[in-house]
Image: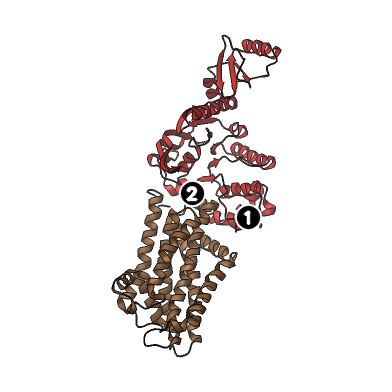
Amino acid sequence: MSSTLLRAEGLRQVYRTRSGRERVRRVALDGVSLDIRRGQRVALVGANGSGKSTLLRLLARIEEPQGGAVQHLDEQGTEVSRRESAMRTGVVFQSPGLDRLLTVRENLRAQAALYGVTDAGDRVRACAERVGIAGRLDDRVGALSGGLARRADLARALVSEPSLLLLDEPLAGLDESSRDVFLRLLREMISRDPEFTLIMSSHSPDEIRLADRVIVLDAGRVAESGEPDGVASRTFGGCELIAIVAASGGTEAGSLRSWRAGDSTIVGGDREQIEHWALKQSRRGVAVEVRSPDFVSAYRFMLARSNESEEVAA
Amino acid sequence: MSSALGELISREFVRIRRQPTRIVATLGTAAVFWLLAASGFAGSMTLPGEDTSSYSVYLLPGIALMVVLFGTIFGAIGLIQDRHSGFLQAVLVSPVSLWTVAMSKLLPACLLATLQGLAVLASVFLIDGTGAGAAGLITSTIALFCGAIGVLSIGLALAWRIDSVAGFHGVMNILLLPAWVLSGAMFPVAGASGWLSIVMKANPLHWVHGCVGSGIGATGDAGAIAWSVTVLFPFASIGLLLLTIRRSHGRRGAGDG
């Protein structure tokens, strides 16, 4: 089994903010502990405001935690220096970390200098080619579309050839072609280096499918963690099949297990039971979607539940 | 100089080159102000026992200081822009030290501000009878550079904590403009009332102004106290800047990358 690359223990982060006229404290993270092993592809998922971006910022060491600690470890399990951990880490933020007044090439060269890359010219060209923006290297970042700027930002993160890549919702707001470039690149990096470690906050099923481990955050706490299929199985109580009914009213689950999530009802059971139940519903004119209890379904369910409880709390 | 610091400094100069309005605004404001105060209102602003032409000479170091102030304000705003664009975040993730980050913002803006101030001071040679020499101009430029570092370090410390450009402008207007007026840029401390004279002497820019003025012969000899304060001012301000950055980033220090 591969060794631990990153360890977070009891992370706690509280921000002071304003709500109307009052100053309020918002707990972004509340006792988050996790171990990330070398070569893992981790998806941090959760509703908006669940603490994903804050956790990434702490793991990237942009901020120091107010409580707990983040440790980057070497193969022997010894904590490495901040400089060493920074050298092996690349981060892609929600908004590109690029200077809009500079060209793409100037931005990438600056990044290469920050990491002490000696063959900066070649490295910059290679990274630009990998993300498909080699033809725009001498354009100012301010003149690029949002999608191209995000690609340039990915190239920026790759210039230092990191073995740990942290991505904050990398596909958000991208067009189809840029999404494909991102996903293709991530798959390529994963397949090329078994030690390459990826941690991404995500809402996108496409990104989540890349992950071999998901960590579900809810209100700043780890609600679930494990392999995607394991989390899905636990969420739906080990059911073999699930049926999703969009309308909340008029659906009788009988002896089958059922869950309400937002406007949907999810009914679970073994294959025979669910197929029989779904057939009965469709004869009654109710639209039913039958599927395996995969993580994407489980995540949508958890998200709907989380939003529901937020509404009740409000 | 490390290659990271060199690259970040060269980036700042590229940014400055691509924002020519920044230089035009700084020098233009000073030129207009000098024209109005030293020429237009010169008759109503004579110094005690002096003629009107001496006021235009007296104003020179103050105008140079104003150019430095505006230049450093633009420099500090650059930090807020870097934060908004995400570039600062990318730099903070990298292995460079916070000291490098601070110096990369400080040195280019201070150099530019000092050069702009020098351009203003050099105009002293266009005015007859000042007796200013090249050595004096160099002395004044050194004092200006110290002032630029001192003011920009304070500006950067504030910009590190303030998220909006408008908010930063507000704070700078409250702090820096009065500090400039109270430096003796417009009126000598000799004519100030008791309490105001104490406030002026507590203002480091007052001593910087004295050193700048004495070099080009616009004011009297600055003296040892003025030079001591002028030289200590940038060190104290850099200390404040590093303390602010360190407090914002927990235990990450200047030297631990």
Identified at 44% across, 46% down, the residue is: A63
* Secondary structure state at the residue bearing disc 2: helix
Measured as percent of width and height from the top left, residue B52 is found at: 44, 86
Q: Chain of mark 1?
A: A
Q: Nearer the viewer, residue A180 or A237?
A: A237
Q: Can residue B149 be seen in this snapshot?
A: no
* x and y percentages locating residue A247 in the rendered image: 63, 21
| C-alpha distance separating marks 1 and 2 | 22 Å
Residue annotated with mark 1: A142
Whether B120 is drawn above or below A133: the answer is below
Seen in the image, is A277 located left or right of residue A28?
right
Which residue is label 2 attached to? B93
Instruction: Look at discs 1 and 2 and give the one toward the viewer.
Output: 1
**Chain whose colour in the figure is red:** A
Which disc number belongs to residue A266? none
Dot 1 surroundings within 10 Å: few (below 14), some, or many (20 or more)?
Answer: some
Q: Chain of mark 2?
A: B
Identify the image's colour scheme: rainbow, by chain, secondary structure or one colour: by chain
Chain identifier, brown in the render: B
Q: Residues within 10 Å of mark 2 (few under 14, many from 20)?
A: many
At mark 1, the secondary structure is helix
Q: Nearer the viewer, residue B143 or A130?
A: B143
Residue B14, picture quadrant: bottom right
Does the image show residue A146? yes
Give me the residue at 53% from left, 45% from top.
A91
Name the residue type under label 1: Gly
Observer-nearest of A45 and A198 = A45
Of residues B156 and B98, the one nearer the viewer is B156
Q: Are marks 1 and 2 on the same chain?
A: no
A80 sits to left or right of B74:
left
